[in-house]
Image (spheres, rainbow, N blue to C red):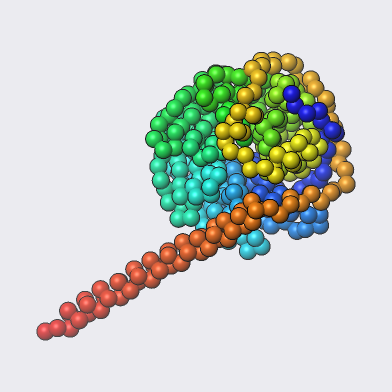
């Protein structure tokens, strides 16, 4: 049974800077930065520390549709309607490398847990997997018959799940590159999909106003929620696996208790459709974005003690799967608005509680430095290749001149 909530979720602060609808948000690993993308073609990186200046990154030539921090937090990927993916170093310089990833809008980008690869989804009906540091194309998954709106790696990196306008959710085996299963229960376009932190379940949101949860081992539909009165645009699991938050075009966010299969909260904050939502890596905060051009940061105020204790212990996947992967089966067709309703009254901004410096964070920092070094090496290799090409061209020209000069 899920632990009772200590307090209601509270709106900590909101960020204004985008000039059009916000489409995506993601927290860095240490919760010090929050990235957001928008229809205004700009990528913003906000600092959670009060009075800190935000970074505005420009480079995409059309709307940004997706954003994701690398596991170390030292790289940031974004996808756009301009058909490209950009890999950014999220500091004051905002350096980035861009490459043409698809032949149509890139809808989704997500790093694997090891940071070595990432997956993209596109309106060209394909899912593609790439090597991070060389931005090298590895392989494509091509069984969807309509736009692919979202693709995510499983926590262990062995599976990929994708959601499409062909009304299906597909589960892929990364090593064999085969489609393991197709889930066809949605009655409309599937807008978003993600893995439960245990890796044993997936949740998908749809234009049919529903959220569905399946077991990826048995492929059974475990939970079905029909709580919103408009399309569900995004969702995010709390790291504990006990809660799920959704964002909808009905302008609300809803927090679901997955252990008890019930609606906990309906949050009213955005004026117009809520387009995206994401928990921080510790679950202490969550962020939402909307067509009102605002990015809002909320404090969860639930499960923080239990989850904080859990985070101190490195649990093997088998233990995690057996403890939190078994969600109860529930069909929740209740009317929208059930559960506690929280109005968005802004409280005084508070600085996030810092995560203790453990071996894990040290390793993350080392991996992050490797991220940056490898990115630098990749750029140098590209420059060396260009220099070699120029030298070859010079030699060829010199040989040609000598041949012409020879009687």
Residue under the point 77% across and 38% down? 304
Give x and y (percent) for residue 296: 76, 42
Residue 139 appears in the picture as rendered: yes
Residue under the point 44% across and 37% down? 174
Number of numbered discs overlaid on the protein picture: 0
Give x and y (percent) for residue 80: 55, 45
Give x and y (percent) for residue 67: 60, 46
Where does the C terminus fall, quadrant-wise?
A: bottom left
Nearer to the camera, 255 or 330: 330
The answer to which image quadrant residue 7 occupies is top right
Q: From the viewer's perspective, is residue 47 above or below residue 169?
A: below
Q: Is residue 310 left or right of residue 338?
A: left
Residue under the point 46% across and 47% down? 130
Q: Is residue 237 left or right of residue 337?
A: left
Q: Is residue 241 left or right of residue 392?
A: right
Residue furthest out toward the left: 407
Nearer to the camera, 222 or 380: 222
Nearer to the camera, 182 or 215: 215
């Amino acid at each position: 049974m899920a632990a009772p909530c200590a307090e209601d979720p509270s709106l900590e602060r909101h960020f204004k800077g985008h000039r059009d609808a916000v489409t995506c948000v993601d927290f860095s690993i240490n919760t010090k930065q929050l990235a957001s993308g928008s229809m205004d073609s700009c990528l913003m990186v906000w600092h959670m520390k009060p009075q800190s200046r935000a970074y505005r990154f420009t480079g995409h030539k059309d709307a940004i549709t997706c954003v994701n921090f690398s596991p170390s937090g030292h790289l940031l990927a974004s996808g756009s309607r301009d058909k490209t993916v950009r890999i950014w170093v999220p500091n004051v310089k905002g350096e980035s490398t861009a490459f043409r990833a698809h032949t149509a809008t890139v809808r989704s980008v997500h790093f694997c847990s090891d940071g070595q690869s990432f997956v993209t989804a596109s309106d060209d009906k394909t899912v593609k997997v790439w090597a991070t540091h060389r931005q090298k194309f590895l392989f494509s998954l091509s069984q969807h018959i309509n736009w692919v709106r979202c693709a995510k790696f499983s926590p262990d990196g062995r599976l990929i799940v994708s959601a499409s306008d062909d009304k299906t959710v597909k589960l892929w085996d990364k090593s064999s590159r085969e489609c393991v299963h197709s889930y066809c229960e949605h009655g409309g376009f599937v807008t978003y999909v993600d893995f439960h932190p245990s890796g044993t379940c997936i949740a998908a949101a749809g234009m049919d106003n529903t959220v569905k949860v399946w077991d990826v081992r048995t492929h059974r539909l475990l939970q079905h929620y029909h709580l919103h009165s408009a399309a569900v645009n995004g969702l995010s699991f709390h790291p504990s696996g006990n809660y799920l938050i959704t964002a909808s075009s009905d302008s609300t966010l809803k927090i679901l208790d997955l252990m008890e299969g019930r609606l906990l909260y309906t949050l009213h904050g955005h004026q117009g459709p809520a387009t995206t939502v994401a928990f921080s890596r510790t679950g202490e905060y969550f962020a939402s974005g909307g067509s009102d051009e605002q990015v809002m940061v909320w404090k969860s105020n639930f499960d923080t003690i239990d989850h904080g204790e859990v985070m101190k212990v490195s649990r093997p996947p088998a233990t995690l799967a057996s403890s939190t992967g078994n969600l109860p089966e529930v069909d929740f067709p209740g009317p929208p608005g059930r559960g506690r309703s929280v109005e968005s009254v802004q409280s005084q901004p508070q600085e996030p509680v810092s995560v203790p410096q453990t071996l894990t964070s040290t390793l993350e920092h080392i991996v992050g430095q490797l991220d940056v070094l490898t990115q630098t090496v990749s750029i140098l290799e590209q420059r060396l290749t260009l220099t070699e090409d120029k030298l070859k061209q010079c030699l060829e020209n010199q040989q040609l001149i000598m041949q012409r000069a020879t009687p």
